[in-house]
Amino acid sequence: MTISQNGAYVRQPLIAGNWKMNMDHVQGITLVQKLAWTLKDAGHEYDRAEVAVFPPFTDIRGVQTLTLGDKLDVVYGAQDLSTQDSGAYTGEISGQFLKKLGCTYVLVGHSERREYHNETNQVIASKLAAAYRHEITPVLCVGEGLEIRKAGEHVSYTLNQLNESLEGVSAEQAENLVVAYEPVWAIGTGEVAGPADAQEMCAAIRAALVERFGEDIAQKTRLLYGGSVKAANAAAIMRERDVDGVLVGGASLDAEEFANIVRFEHHLVTG
Ligand SMILES: O=C(CO)COP(=O)(O)O
């Protein structure tokens, strides 16, 4: 984190790829390798934009071995973690294991977890606590469905998700927090919230974080937008003041396309 000459905080952009339930461990290694090579060829500087991938659990060991062996600057995380640390919880994955696998981040409360696994804001709050116990930075996902957007209640709904999920998170913990705004109606639909919609929500989220944790922490927290992000629309979204990155689903499965999203600045210049 740096402070620019005029005193404003400059947040390092985070370009994150959520692979969801795609790519087996062999395909996963190939994708990370191809992504790293493509970015290297394009002269990408990682301090200009951090690059993170979120593969399925079964890929993480392979991604760890590859990034360590080839000294890649791509970081990675998991798509979920257990509220528990160990014990008789069949099928669950502990944050402890993820930390040992070198995960920098973990997604918490993705809308698909909320929808298909009935994750409530209270469960999500426990998962955030688990992430902090193991010193993994959570990427907390929030966002409204179409009905709520149509009713014009998207801001209050999303802020309620945010506030309930952050219950119990201290200001000190919030120094390591990323929030992703992913309107459910824009995920995998080709329907993108406009840059102004993304900005509206991210500004509201930042204001809520100011209230909760104070100006200093809120200004440092990176806020991402997710939902049908492609190379063609990433630059316009990233131009918004409170949007510090993107969480990409489908387009992150294509190394070339994802690399072009990472290099959004290039697209800002060339249009
Ligand atoms: O859910 C998402 C990322 O977590 C967004 O997915 P798509 O980019 O495929 O719409």
Image (tube, helix red, strand yellow):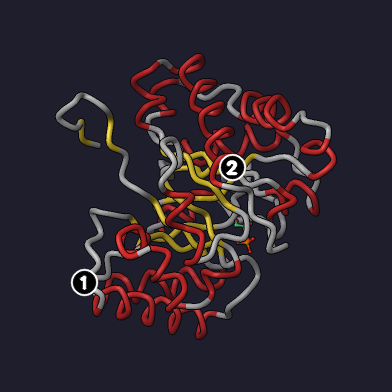
The extreme front residue here reads 271
Q: Is residue 72 depicted above or below 245 in this figure?
A: below
Picture quadrant where residue 40 is located: bottom left
Q: Amino acid at mark 1?
A: Gly
Name the spot of residue 182 as percent of width and height, x first: 63, 47
Which residue position is annotated with label 1? 43
Q: Secondary structure at mark 1?
A: loop
Q: Is residue 257 depicted above or below 45 in this figure?
A: below
Which residue position is annotated with label 2? 181
Q: Is residue 4 left or right of residue 87?
A: left
Q: Secondary structure at mark 2?
A: strand
Name the spot of residue 150 as percent of width and height, x first: 82, 38
In this view, the residue in front, 234 or 102, is 234
Q: Is residue 118 depicted above or below 20 in this figure?
A: above
Residue at point 65% right, 44% down? Answer: 109
Picture quadrant where residue 268 is located: bottom left
Name the spot of residue 159 as percent of width and height, x first: 65, 26
Residue at point 48% right, 52% down? Answer: 246
Residue at point 41% right, 72% down? Answer: 63
In this view, the residue in front, 215 or 136, is 215
Residue at point 54% right, 46% down? Answer: 195
